[in-house]
Amino acid sequence: MVCLTTPSMKTMRCVCVVAFVVIAIIASALCGTVSSSPSPSLISNSNNNNNDNNNNNYNLEDSGLGSFLQMTDLHIDFQYAVGSSPYCDKTLCCHSYNASDPRVAAPQGDYQCDLNEEMFRSALQFAATEFPTAEYIMWTGDNPSHWLWEQSQDIVLGIIKNVTDIFHEYFPNTRFFPLIGNHDTFPVDELPPPPKSDWLFNALKVMWG
């Protein structure tokens, strides 16, 4: 994962797409799907002798193991504005209200700002091309951006719905195991027990059921 410090915010942002790709590669490598040369068996047998070395190549299909992808802490900013300024006096920049800075937000995103839809789609396209046989995707929450002062229950649910739909565009036949994070609630960091949280869980049941 590549973590970058935002000077104006004094907080740490993580480029989740990089983490997603790295996790995917590691997971596939552990499961035997990524290998530039024959790999030794992951299962050792103390009774093996030197004559068995030629049979030590690990076969994914025979192992009963598989591969998976994980994506977490997306914090997608669907209000990201190409050409706006990455620097501003607010918690989240790269919006249309601050477009006068000489440096501008690029189409593929800016490390000073949250992930934009274009970069998210690019990561999913890469993953779908490079790992088409992934058995499932672990999607571990935190989908909304850090634009906290402009959020509501409807906005949070809308973002989760958008992300759900985009996932299914690129992985229409792959199983998902989604979780919610502290940013998938409203207000952020607050998740009271039912019935106060029914607005969230009832909607997720429809989206993910």
Image (spheres, helix red, strand yellow):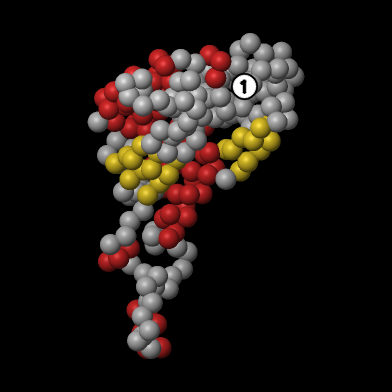
Residue at 50 percent across and 24 percent down: it is 188
Q: Is residue 148 above or below residue 189?
A: above
Tell me the kind of residue under disc 1. Leu
Q: Quadrant of residue 3?
A: top right
Residue 25 location, x and y as percent? 47, 52
Give 85 or 42, whichever is nearer the viewer.
Answer: 42
Quadrant location, the N terminus: top right
Give 153 or 195, whichever is nearer the viewer.
Answer: 195
Q: Is residue 102 left or right of residue 111?
A: right
Q: Is residue 177 left or right of residue 143?
A: left
Residue at 48 percent across and 20 percent down: it is 187
Is residue 79 visible in the rendered structure shown here? Answer: yes
Mark 1: few/some/many CA within 10 Å (<14, 14-19, 20+): many
Is residue 104 visible in the rendered structure shown here? Answer: no
Q: Is residue 22 left or right of residue 195?
A: right
Residue at 53 percent across and 44 percent down: it is 19
Q: Is residue 158 above or below residue 35?
A: above
Element class at badge 1: loop
The number of numbered badges drawn on the structure is 1
Residue at 45 percent across and 63 percent down: it is 35
Q: Is residue 64 above or below residue 42?
A: above
Give 35 or 22, whichever is nearer the viewer.
Answer: 22
Quadrant location, the C terminus: top left
**For mark 1, what is the residue?**
92
Q: Quadrant of residue 205?
A: top left
